[in-house]
Image: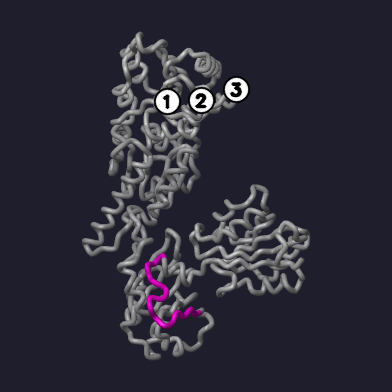
Amino acid sequence: MSSANRSPQARSGFVAFVGAGPGDENLLTLRGADLLGRADVVVLDQAAYGSLLRHCRADVEVMDISPDAAENSVSLRTIQHAKAGRTVVRLCQGDPSFFSSVADEVAACAKADVEFEIVPGVPPATAVLTYAGIPSAPGVPEFRVVDATQVDDWAPHAACTGTLVIYNGVTEAVPIGKALIAAGKPDSTPVAVTSDGTTTEQYTVVSSLGRLGPDLKHAGMTEPALIVVGDAVTAREKLSWFETKSLFGWRVLVPRTKEQAEGLSDQLRSYGAVPEEVPTISVEPPRTPQQMDRAIKGLVTGRYEWVAFTSANAVKAVREKFEEYGLDARAFAGLKVAAVGEATAQSLVDFGVKPDLMPTGEQSSEGLLAEWPPYDSMLDPINRVLLPRADIATETLVAGLTELGWECDDVTAYRTVRAAPPPAPIREAIKGGGFDAVLFTSSSTVRNLVGIAGKPHNVTVIAVIGPQTAKTAEEFGLRVDVMADKPSASALAAALADYGAKQRHAAISAGEVPRRPSQTRRGARRRVK
């Protein structure tokens, strides 16, 4: 069997040179992700590509190398691992065969008779242009890509009749522009310079060859960056889609429990934001479990007519008790189930239980009470309701149900404990205006965040899930900028995105460059046109 047809598992040792793409971790190829999942060792610049380790096994060995690490040293260690029978993945910037620095490492593997594979990646030459809204080859006869460090004479490239893409040239962008003009390129030729392409730090300056100097003067452009020369740049005004996202580049603090933050963070990323999850609440079992044990037993033996869930955490607590006793969703047969809102209802559905009652208006205890039927001895054989809740829950629901003729077993299903303070850099960013927005999903997140990390800076946009959370925020001296139209985390993220879109539109209408809230604080670096 030839080496090309053998799987990595069958090899005595194997090295895969995998293109990591241009920056956006979601542009990794399926083959690359598959190989990372099988890797025994991963060799990478962790500062640049550490997020891709999520594809790896928990026991993977990580070899962190700096961008300027000696190739001989890297090759030697990679070969040693492969010779020891291990599967090694070497992550490379962009595409390993496209202006890559790993050619010598590949050659070293071949010389050492170590089997290897080269997995193409998405090259910056096309991806960064796409993310900048510049078509790669819009009906032009030529698409030329050059490495500025390898060019001594720009005259041949001035003759390019299509799109010219220049790698590694940002520090010499102005001299390159002058050289192209001197070689006959019109000084009015459109130019775009994009740094940190395909990431939420992406920034593009549109200019012309003749104006590159003044337009780049205060832009603060650094590598990695691409220079694009040609008429294709003019399409950016209509085709720009990435940098124009409503929350592009916004650093958003998500102060919730880790489990709750995940879906919200994914939604924020879809708007271009950079979410930072900071737990403010730790959810723990009740100090004495006997009360919950009796409630679960009563639920199974027919003690209750209704079970009312006021949070996803309550659903989780009951589900965990069920699993402890070897029960599943079938134990809810014959019971009526109520959920206080959409998130709680979704948790029940995920458990296999469809709620019978949910507020059609305000998603709160008051909203649930407005829908709850009064006890009727002719219709309801049992008049008892199980209410599993947090140790700090409001008594509103119990009082309201009692008024309607129901008896409540108000049971502590879990405790909410203030989390440990976040690391010092996070605390400093909160107080110093390093975050563009904070999302508060409950009054307790307001109290706990201020308690463990301090008050957000006054430039930070404060977004809250509803009126009660707004009231708590104002009691702490915070200015509420955004409130969700309905009390759900998804609606809150959407409301913030709408706010960001309006701010962006207002800036553009005023002829200004859109700025994130954190860029308006004193001392923040400003980028100009």
**Pointer 2: residues within 10 angstroms few (<14), some, or many (20+)?**
many
Q: Is residue 129 depicted above or below 32 in this figure?
A: below
The secondary structure that dominates the magenta segment is: loop
Q: Where is residue 139 in the image (x, y as percent from the top left)?
A: 38, 78
Asked whether disc 2 touches disc 1, contact meaning CB atoms under 8 Å apart, the reply is: yes
Circle 1 sits on which residue? 309
Q: Is mark 3 on a helix, strand or loop?
A: loop
Q: Say which of 56 and 31 sits in front.
A: 31
Q: In this view, does 374 lie to the left or right of 301?
A: left
Quadrant including the C terminus:
bottom left
Image point (36%, 70%), residue name: 205
Q: Is mark 2 on a helix, strand or loop?
A: helix
Q: Give the range drawn in magenta.
A: 131-146
Q: Which label was assigned to residue 318?
A: 2
Query: In terms of image quadrants, where is residue 160?
Result: bottom left
Query: In terms of image quadrants, where is residue 343?
Result: top left
